[in-house]
Amino acid sequence: MSKILIVEDDLSIQALLHDFIEEAGHSVELAADGVEALAKYSEQPFDLILLDIMLPKIDGYSVCEYIRQKSDVPIIMLTALDSEENQLKGLDLQADDYITKPFSMPVLLRKIAAVLRRSAKQSGEPQTVTYKNLTLDLEGYRVYIQQESIDLTPREFEILRELIMHQGKILTRQNLLQTLWKYEFFGEERIIDTHIKNLRKKLGAADYIETIRGVGYRIDKEN
């Protein structure tokens, strides 16, 4: 599951993009202006950024230029500015693609998939995350302790992945529900506790997950 940041100030287009891209199996974060986009980018890693150009506060060109100084994360510019000059400016700033509005959602989804495939191929990095003697196969949803495969449910895998990807950070039950379930459970936050209990049982004697009483959970304990 890829994490995509959508930067779009038109809330109707933002909602449309959110629903279609999330339905296609991606995790989505939203930003409505350039300042919020850079704040979200600084808080967490993304696999791809969909970036409008005509944004409040900081325009998309400046956002793209700033991010390119820090990262090679794929950027697709999605904008009403359709002149050749605008397209060349975006591509000169090393955007990976430039799509003009109005656009076809099926075509956009295929372009997103193509850019993500190209990015993964160019990186040459295995799609795994490690923590101590744990290895997570992000594509295959498999977990290994050293060479031994551990049988987790998809939801258990996703919770473990989120904790490891945010080592040292406390994730509240609400954080996990909103990230993984995409909506609020209204009083059913304790479902996270059940999954954590099952995770601990399956991972065995090693104590990877720390409970922060009354707050949530964390991997990578502070000494």
Image: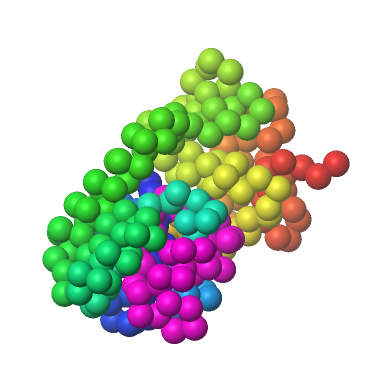
Q: Where is residue 213 in the image (x, y as percent from the top left)?
A: 76, 55
- 166 relative to 8, above or below: above
Q: Where is residue 81 in the image (x, y as percent from the top left)?
A: 24, 77
Q: Residue at 46% across / 71% down in the picture? A: 62
- 110 relative to 200, above or below: below
Relative placement, left or right, of 135 versus 81 is right
Q: Which residue lies furthest to the right in this view?
A: 223
Q: Position of residue 161 (x, y in %)?
A: 53, 42
Relative placement, left or right, of 70 versus 171 is left
Is residue 24 visible in this depiction of the protein? no
Q: Reply yes or no: does residue 130 show up in magenta.
A: no
- Residue sitting nearer the eye, 115 or 128: 115
How many numbered marks are there? 0
Q: Residue at 48% across / 39% down in the picture? A: 157
Q: Position of residue 88 (x, y in %)?
A: 27, 64
- Residue sitting nearer the eye, 14 or 134: 14
How has the structure been colored for display?
Answer: rainbow
Q: Which stretch did the figure color magenta?
A: 37-66
Is residue 86 visible in this depiction of the protein? yes
Q: Quadrant of the C terminus?
A: top right
Q: Residue at 72% across / 41% down in the picture? A: 220
Q: Reply yes or no: does residue 53 show up in magenta.
A: yes
Relative placement, left or right, of 14 versus 222 is left
Q: Residue at 31% across / 59% down in the picture? A: 91
Relative placement, left or right, of 42 versus 93 is right
- Residue sitting nearer the eye, 12 or 72: 72
- 171 relative to 129, above or below: below
